[in-house]
Structures are given as C-alpha cells and as structure tokens.
Image (cartoon, rainbow, N blue to C red):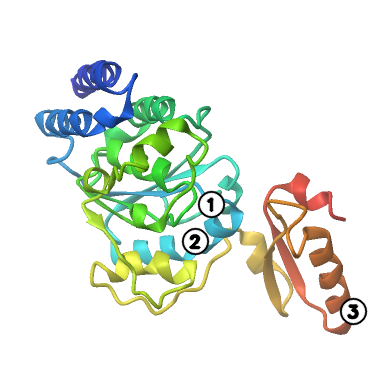
Amino acid sequence: MEINVYNELYDKIKDNYSSYLKSDLITFPVFANIVEKLFNQYNLRNNSKKAILVTQLNALGDAFLTTGFLRELKQCYSNYEIILVCSKENYSIFDSCPYCSKIYSVKFKNKNMKELLSEIITFSYENLWQYKFEMSFSTHWGDLLLPALFINWFSGANQRIGYGEHTKSMYFKNDILYKSTFGQGFNFDNYLLTDNVKNPYNMYLDLDRKFYLLEHLGFKIINKSPEVFNSTFYSLPNGKKVAMLLRASSPKKKYPVFKLVKALKEINTIEPIIYILLGDKNDIFKEF
C-alpha cells in the first residue's frame, strides 16, 4: 500500500516540476510550497521514524573529516538508524563504516541545476522515502553544498540541519541559471533547511564545523578525531600509524602529490612510520 502511495506522490511532484521548474528556476518558491503540502498530505514529513540521513558528496579529504562526525552522531542518537549518501568518488572512505545501516553512493549526470533536481527527486523516491527520516544533516561547507541540501530536502526529512548559502557555494558558478537566480538575491535556505546553522565567526577548521552541527543541537563533543573504517588498520604492527590521503585536485597545487610521496619516503628513513594510504587504488599506485 505504501509503495502505491509513494508512486502517486512521486508522479505529482514530477508533474509540478515540469510545470514550474523546467523553464525557469525563479519559480522554485511556488514549487517548494507545493512539494511541502504534498509531503504533509502523504505523511512524509510528519510521520517520521527513528532514522537520520547524512549527506557527504565532497572529495576524499572532506569525506575523511566526516568519519568522526558519524561516530559521534551514533553516540548521540544510539537508537537511530543512520543512512549515508556519499559520492562514488569518496565511497572508499565509508565502505566499512560500522555506524551506518545503509550507504548509498551516487554520481549524478547533470550539473545543470534543473536537470540535477530531477535526478535527485527520482533518487529520493527510489531510495530515501522509505525511511521517513526524523532528521537529516548536510555536513557540507562550500563546494557541493546545494546538491546535498536538495537531497536532504527531497528525502522527506522533518528536521534538516546544515549550513546554508552564506558559505558561498560556487558549485553552479558556470550555470546561467545560477548567475541569474542568485545574482538577484534568491536564496534557497528558507526552503531547504529547518536549522540554517551559523558557526562562530572564529571557527575556521572544516573539522570543527562538522561537529558544530551536533553542538548546535546541545550536544557536547569531546572526541573530534577522524576514524579509519578498515579492520586492517588496527591489525597492523604496533608503532606510529598515520592515515594519508594521496590525491590533489590539480597538479598545479603548491604541494602536488608526487612531492608529498617523496617527502614521506625521506621522513621514513629517519623514523619508521606506518602510512595508511586512503582513496582509490589506481590513484595510489600511480605514485609508487
């Protein structure tokens, strides 16, 4: 019965998407109000279960910083099911995470905002609505902020916690719609988030910003260390262990990867250290 209800809800949302968004994103507020009414009508917002959604679509480094957040989130909400939506690129970081009941790795085809929204609507219908999330967390700051916020919103989660557009995401900076829409001061925050978190002005580290989402809810977080979700890491011989991410988004970066590898080898001749290289195997093996 519930599947049939969601089929009906999905059809209605897609119909309204075609009517209000396919030609012009400026009409998003109208579309958003209709979607909220439909979510309430079909008890997706107000019939929540003990389930939490977390989205993390960023690159490997930001993904690794989220590992500790998942651990502390599970401690704060021990009786809740945690569902993670990550990217195909950072899935290797979360593959064996013991705190998540289910992990979805996604790679959307479109960067055009209108087409991307259509993909997210379908993804949410096929994978997320079944959980009836009580809350969701977007751990993003800057890049890929908006896609993550849209996933949280379309997931049906009742309480949606994250950082809004004040972080100045430039994910769609080359999209004509982005320029025309945001250039006019349009803001999605009021629609996508129930808790639009503003971190303290003197909080500069991305790691601290992730945990601040829990502190915003009144939790006191003491352990902010990242975690490696791999049993091999803990079965290695005793000694100093350092987890490393060997990837740079551009070879023109100040410290390209091959220079980092060279430095690690030189350090290891002075003091033996066990380096655990995280990320895609092909990226790692290219460097050795």
- CB within 8 Å, label 1 to label 2: yes
Q: Is residue 18 above or below residue 201?
A: above
Q: Is residue 76 above or below residue 28?
A: below
Quarter in which the N terminus is drawn: top left
Q: Which residue is mark 1?
A: 94
The residue tagged 3 is 269
Numbered disc 3: secondary structure: helix
- Give the quadrant of residue 5: top left
The residue drawn where x is 42% and y is 48% is 145
Distance from the alpha carbon under mark 1 to that under mark 2 = 7 Å
Instruction: Tell me the kind of residue under disc 2.
Output: Thr
Let me know if residue 50 appears in the view: no
Pick the front one: 157 or 164: 164
Label 1 secondary element: helix
Q: Amino acid at mark 3?
A: Thr
The earlier-in-sequence mark between 1 and 2 is 2
State the image coordinates of residue 186 (x, y, percent, origin top left).
Answer: 29, 42
Mark 3 or mark 2: whose residue is earlier in sequence: 2
